[in-house]
Structure formats: structure tokens, C-alpha cells
Image: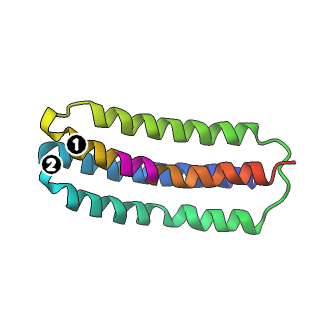
């Protein structure tokens, strides 16, 4: 059951970062000159939303055991990651003026990297400790 701790960590991290992303990307769409403030808020929000997942990951590695069947948790993490990347991609394309496209694209690219971190850690765990 340790493998589901990593799924929970990925879900919590992705949810928190997507909420912070959505709030700040709307501000950038309205006024693209606020991108520095939005990026600062994104970094602070992602750091706050990743504290519990990092604690869960440390707990998962501390209580590690060989995982027999990783297919269900692996697919859940892949779905969480795919949903988050798809959500960010859609937000960068919908309701964006032509002159705001650059800052929104830059902000979305940074957000994709941040939202992918914990799910990638979970995927590496699944491959490392599968039998």
C-alpha cells in the first residue's frame, strides 16, 4: 500500500499548483505586466503546496517495500500528470489576446515544469521498487 502514498502525494501537489496557476494566469491575461508578481506567487504557492507531498514521499521511502503490482498506481499518476499538463495547455490557449500570448506562454511553461516534479518522483519510485 506504500505505492498509493506516492499517488496521494502527486494528487495533492498537482491540485495545489493548478489552483495557484489558475489564479495567477487569469491575472496575467488581464494585465501581462504583472508577470513578475504572478511568477513570485506561483513559486511561493507551489512551495507551500509541495510541503505535504514531500513529507509523504519521505515517509514512503522510509517504509519502502518491494511493490508487486504497480499498474494501478502507475496509471493513476500518469493520469494525474496528463490532466495537469492538459489543463495548463488549455489555459494558455483559451481567452488569450494576441499581445498577451508571450507572457502567458512563458508562465505556462514554468508551471508545466513545476507541476511535473512530484509525479515524476512517483514514477521513478514505481520503477525503482517494482519487483
Q: Which mark is residue 102?
A: 1
Residue 51 in magenta?
A: no
Identity of the residue drawn at 29% across and 42% down: 105
Which badge, 2 or 1, comes first in the chain's sequence?
Answer: 2
In this figure, which residue is indicated by the disc labeled 2?
32
Which residue is drawn at the image coordinates 37% and 35% (left, top)? 89
Q: Is residue 18 visible?
A: no
Instruction: Examine the residues drawn in magenta and state their main secondary structure.
Output: helix
Residue 36, image x and y in percent? Answer: 21, 60
Residue range highlighted in magenta: 109-113
The structure's colour scheme is rainbow
- In the picture provided, is 122 more to the left or to the right than 69? left
Q: State how far apart marks 2 and 1 are (Cα).
A: 9 Å
Q: Can the viewer see residue 121 in this picture? A: yes
Label 2 close to label 1 by CB (< 8 Å): yes
Helix, strand or loop at disc 2? helix
Label 2 Cα neighbours within 10 Å, binned few <14 / some 14-19 / many ≥20: some
Residue in the foreground of this view, choosing between 34 and 75: 34
Q: Which mark is residue 67?
A: none
> Around disc 1, counting alpha carbons within 10 Å, would you say few (fewer than 14), some (14 to 19), or many (20 or more)?
some
Question: In this rendering, which labeled residue sits more in front, label 2 or label 1?
Answer: 1
Position above or below: 122 against 88: below
Q: Which residue is drawn at the image coordinates 46% and 40% (left, top)? A: 84
Percent across and percent down for residue 111 are 38, 50
Amino acid at each position: 500500500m506504500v505505492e498509493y502514498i506516492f499517488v496521494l502525494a502527486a494528487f495533492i501537489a498537482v491540485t495545489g499548483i493548478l489552483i495557484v496557476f489558475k489564479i495567477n494566469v487569469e491575472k496575467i491575461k488581464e494585465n501581462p505586466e504583472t508577470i513578475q508578481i504572478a511568477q513570485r506567487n506561483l513559486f511561493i504557492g507551489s512551495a507551500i503546496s509541495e510541503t505535504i507531498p514531500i513529507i509523504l514521499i519521505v515517509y514512503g521511502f522510509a517504509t519502502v517495500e518491494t511493490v508487486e503490482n504497480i499498474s494501478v498506481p502507475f496509471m493513476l499518476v500518469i493520469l494525474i500528470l496528463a490532466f495537469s499538463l492538459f489543463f495548463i495547455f488549455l489555459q494558455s490557449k483559451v481567452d488569450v489576446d494576441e499581445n498577451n500570448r508571450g507572457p502567458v506562454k512563458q508562465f505556462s511553461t514554468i508551471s508545466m515544469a513545476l507541476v511535473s516534479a512530484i509525479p515524476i518522483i512517483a514514477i521513478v519510485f514505481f520503477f525503482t521498487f517494482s519487483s
